[in-house]
Structure formats: structure tokens, C-alpha cells
Amino acid sequence: MRVILIGPPGVGKGTQAKLLVKKYHIPQISTGDMLRANIQQNTALGQHANTFMEAGKLVPDDVILEMIRVRFLEADCKDGYVLDGFPRTIPQAEGLELMLKKIDQKLDAVLVITADNAEIIRRLSSRRSCQECGAVYNLLFSPPHKTDICDHCGGKLYQRDDDKPATIQNRLDVYESQTAPLVEFYYKMDLVRKVNGMGTIDEVSEGIRKALE
Ligand SMILES: [Zn+2]
């Protein structure tokens, strides 16, 4: 099962990726982690990537694609993978397609988790963090026992800038403008499977299972 997972902030994409990993016994490949691993292990590709990063530049797509290619050919990817965080642009998607052809692999699906923006904003803006110990609460799902007070340390709870409605709206806008062309690209290849991301973890997971049948 070779899948790409795409979804907006706040729908539990990470959780769903982990469930896919468990169900299909395939690794989750996140390009950020892969890049860090290459640099840490000081591979030739890692060293190459590092020259760009040290110069304060983005690592070029072809370097990332080569890392992904090497990773896809490792033994644990023989039954597939969940690719997460890549591609983000059309040139990256085109590069990925070209590379997959060269190694004679084909994607099975591009899972697109859909969401209701108002609901995402409601959920994420209900988060509160402890000023002292960093514990995170959600007023809707896991409220503290006493209003605005941390259960663990008695510290005061506050709303991080990232959790403010205007910031969330902005992240959702960025996500949408980035994702729409990609979805169109994969839609033409008949790979897009849309899944409603607004249910419980189990409901979304069930939606993904059906979409992959
Ligand atoms: Zn605390």
C-alpha cells in the first residue's frame, strides 16, 4: 500500500498515519525526519543537504527526491509506505512521479482528509497551555479541573499565539492554497480518495479503510 497522506492542521493526520503504519505494517516516511536522519548519520546526501541549510537555503527538490528514492528501496518499504509532508508543490509532485517510474513503483492512493474550517478553528482555539510546565489542555476534550489552572503544577493557563483563531485561519488558508493544485494533479491521475476528517479518531480511521478498499 503506497499512499500519500494530505490533510489540514487540526484533523489528527499524525494519529491516522500511525494507524495506517500499524494496520498495513508499512513505515511512515516524513521528509523532515528523513532529512534529519540523513544529516545525523552523515550520509553523502545528508552532507549535500547540509551545505544548503548552512547557507540558509532550502534543500533543493532533487536532493530531497533522491533521499526519498533511496528510502523507498529499503527493505521495510517492500509492502509500501505512508508518505507525509511531500509533495507540497506541483514540481515536487512531478518529480516524484518521474522518480517512481524509474524505480518501477506506483502510488495506490492519495488520501485527502477534508475538514470543516469553522470546526477546526473551534477545536484548535480551545487549546490552553500551562505557562509553567507546558502541559496542554483542550477546553472541549480535556479541560483542566479548575478554570485556567494547570492540574499538574497549579500554573496559569494561556492561549498560545498559534492557537488563536486568526493564526489558525491563516494556516488553513496557506494549506488550502498549497493543496488545491496538488489535489487537482492527483485527481487527473485518478488517485485521490477523499475522507471526512471531522469524526472521532475511529470514524476517520474507518473512512480511510473504506477509501483504500
Ligand atoms: Zn503546569
Image: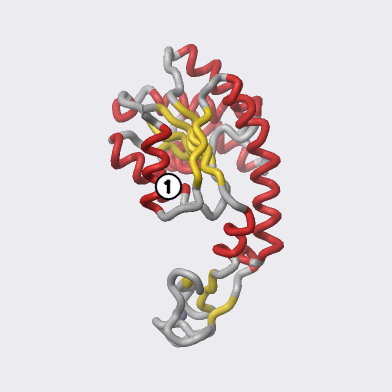
Q: Residue 29: which quarter of the image? A: top left
- x, y percentage for residue 66? 51, 24
Whether 182 is drawn above or below 158: the answer is above
Task: Give left or right: position of 26 versus 153.
Answer: left
Q: Residue at x 57, y 32 (%)?
A: 87
- x, y percentage for residue 133? 46, 77
- The residue wearing badge 1 is 204
- x, y percentage for residue 158? 58, 78
Task: Please identify the quadrant where the C terminus is shown.
Answer: top left
Note whether residue 46 is visible. Answer: no
Q: Quick check: which quadrant has ligand 1?
A: bottom left
Nearer to me, 41 or 172: 172
- Crowding at label 1, few (<14), some or many (≥20) Cα neighbours within 10 Å? many
Is disc 1's CB within 8 Å of ligand 1? no
Q: Residue at x 62, y 43 (%)?
A: 54
Q: Residue at x 54, y 35 (%)?
A: 86
Nearer to me, 120 or 22: 120
Question: Callout 1: helix, strand or loop?
Answer: helix
Q: Amino acid at mark 1?
A: Val
Note whether residue 144 is visible. Answer: yes
Whether 108 is drawn above or below 147: the answer is above
Nearer to me, 206 or 33: 206
- x, y percentage for residue 93? 59, 26
Q: Residue 164: which quarter of the image? A: bottom right
